[in-house]
Image (cartoon, grey):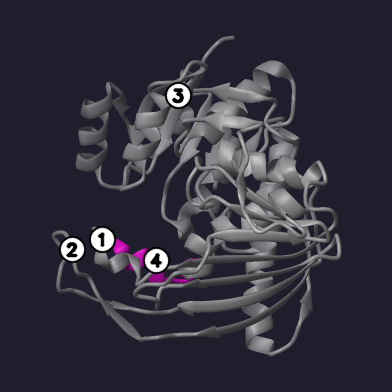
Amino acid sequence: MTDLRLGIIGCGNISGQYLATLTGLPGVTPVACADLDPARAAATAAGHGLRALGADALLADPDVDAVVNLTVPSAHADVTREAIAAGKHVWSEKPLSLTREDAAAITAEAAAAGVRVGCAPDTILGAGLQTTARAVADGLIGRPVAATAFFATAGPELWHPDPEFFYAKGAGPLHDIGVYSLTALVAILGPVATVTAVTARGRDQRVIESGPKAGRTVPVEVATHYSLTLGMASGAVATIVTSFDVPGHHLPHLEVHGTDGSLTAPDPNRHDGHPSLRRRGEREWTELPHTGGYLGSRRGIGVHDLATALAQGRPHIASLELGAHVLDVMLTADEAAAAGRTLPVAGGCALPPPVPGLIGG
């Protein structure tokens, strides 16, 4: 197939991980990059053999087929919509946008332009979570009844060189790290119907502890600890705890429990790992061999899946529909916490299609 030529907009911390993946895969070719900081774009271009352009020039470039949007969350919707208007396919980092209105506009504009939009996280494409989803779909635990997911840290200011945006509107632990757990649960169990949420904020300010900004104070505009109860449309009940206020814990990443057994899944922030199964009445856990998904994959594999899906005429898996539903659930969680009651999720999504077999290695 003809390679999908990629333009990267946003050359921050995550771009290096994407480029390490995308420069080694068939079907995609990074050709250009842009950033608000021209020096950062130039350094990224020099390190990966790209052309450094301004964002407007990149969007107008006929040699760019698709935009990989790695900007900060507050810019996601604007950059995605500009790329769609330029006739480009788009892969967006999470979240898709900050509002339902922008998500709806992206959906309508992409359909009108005849372009595809995909949205992170793409960890659901890895062999670990794909095998977990297949095990549930194949009935290895019977009818799913409950699930739990935990993703909690002490906060990104400990390691990230530019952590301010993590504490601004549209970020926080649910939108930044809990989104991995939530997306995995939707990919395994289907859409969410209702949300109950309680939140807390450990501190009103954070101090950057690494990099050139060490010692600077960051104001906290969002909740930093979430406890969610999700009523899945399937009838299962899921619990998510996600936090920037937990120095350490021994909690499992993700577990799914059914009428005939339980599954413990790999870390939804990673692509690899194996789920383990314990059937009703058994005392031991059995590690399951991989049955589907991308083997040895890393961040950026979703861009490759989008390109491959285009060439094959099939739906891509980390889809616009999935990203919009996950955003809707996260926004509903914030609203439910503020209201102090359970709220319905207005929209839904189809269960994402599986990766067609085991790919890579």
Tag nearer the camera, 3 or 2: 2
* Mark 4 neighbour class, 10 Å CA radius: few under 14, some 14 to 19, many 20 or more: many
Q: Secondary structure at mark 4?
A: helix
Would you say residue 294 is visible in this rendering?
yes
Counting residues from the N terminus, which is met first, the one under dot 2 or under dot 4?
Answer: 4
Q: Which residue is mark 3?
A: 61
The answer to whether residue 101 shows anywhere in this view is: no
The mark found on residue 159 in the picture is: 1
How far separated are the C-alphas under marks 3 and 1? 35 Å
Rendered residue at 63%/60% (across/down): 255
Residue 210 is marked as 2
User: How far is mark 4 from mark 3, CA to CA?
Assistant: 31 Å
* Foreground tag (4 vs 1): 1
> What amino acid does circle 3 point to?
Asp
* Three-letter code, disc 4: Phe
N-terminal of the pair, mark 3 or mark 2, is 3
**Marks 2/1: CA–CA distance:** 6 Å
Name which residue type carries label 2: Ser
Element marked by disc 1: loop
Q: Amino acid at mark 1?
A: Trp
Q: Quadrant of residue 50?
A: top left
- Marks 2 and 1 in Cβ contact (< 8 Å): yes
Q: Earlier in the sequence, mark 4 or mark 1?
A: 1
N-term-proximal mark, 4 vs 3: 3
